[in-house]
Image (cartoon, rainbow, N blue to C red):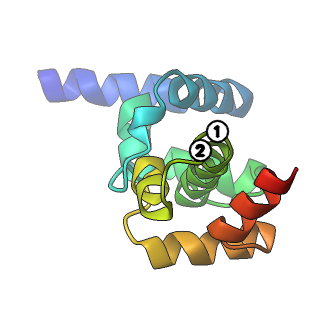
Amino acid sequence: EEMLNDQRKIQRADMADDGELFASIEARLEQDMKLLTPDFDGEALAKLLGVSNNRLKQLFQRNSIYKSADNYLDYLRLIRAMQMLREHPEYGVVAVSEEAGVNAVRTFQRRMAEAVGMTPVELRMMVERG
């Protein structure tokens, strides 16, 4: 009985239009940035929103530059890390990486360099110079 109700909820959520679903994603993640832990992935996002994994995959493939929920979540983690580097100069790179939801510091450094052309340390130095 409960499983059938869960399936019905997912079917209704799957019917939401793409704009509504994106708005729901943004609102939910902005509301609780703590969700961006290293193990929070596309599957966890689908479950949180009450949509199927397939619906979430289609949404990102059709309507997003990120192409996947996991890429979008990584983007949000980088944005969060850049804010922390700017606002908390007392935090080391390891602390920022962990707080932003990226497990491995090397992964964090690589992703940051790919995204903005600078390592976290270089970005912090640039911000401090103004």
Quadrant of the drawing holding the N terminus: top left
| Residue that appears at 66% across and 51% down | 82
Depth check: 75 or 57 in front? 75
Relative to 121, residue 41 above or below: above
Horizontal side of residue 85 vs 10, given as left or right: right
Task: From the top left corner, tell me how far across and down residue 13 is, in percent.
Answer: 49, 26
Task: From the top left corner, tell me how far across and down residue 127 is, in percent.
Answer: 79, 53
Q: Residue furthest left?
A: 1
Relative to 12, residue 79 above or below: below
Task: From the top left corner, tell me how far across and down residue 105 is, in percent.
Answer: 45, 72
Q: Residue furthest right?
A: 130
Relative to 97, residue 130 above or below: above
Give the quarter of the image for residue 16: top right
Horizontal side of residue 113 vs 39, given as left or right: right
> Crowdedness of circle 1 by 10 Å Cα count: few (<14), some, many (20+)?
few
Where disc 1 sits, the SS reads helix
| Residue that appears at 70% across and 75% down | 113
Q: Is residue 75 in view from this perspective? A: yes
Tell me the distance, in whole angstroms, between the alpha carbons under discs 1 and 2.
Answer: 5 Å
Q: Amino acid at mark 1?
A: Glu
**Contact (CB < 8 A) between labels 1 and 2?**
yes
> Mark 1 = which residue?
87
| Residue that appears at 59% across and 22% down | 27
> Mark 2 = which residue?
84
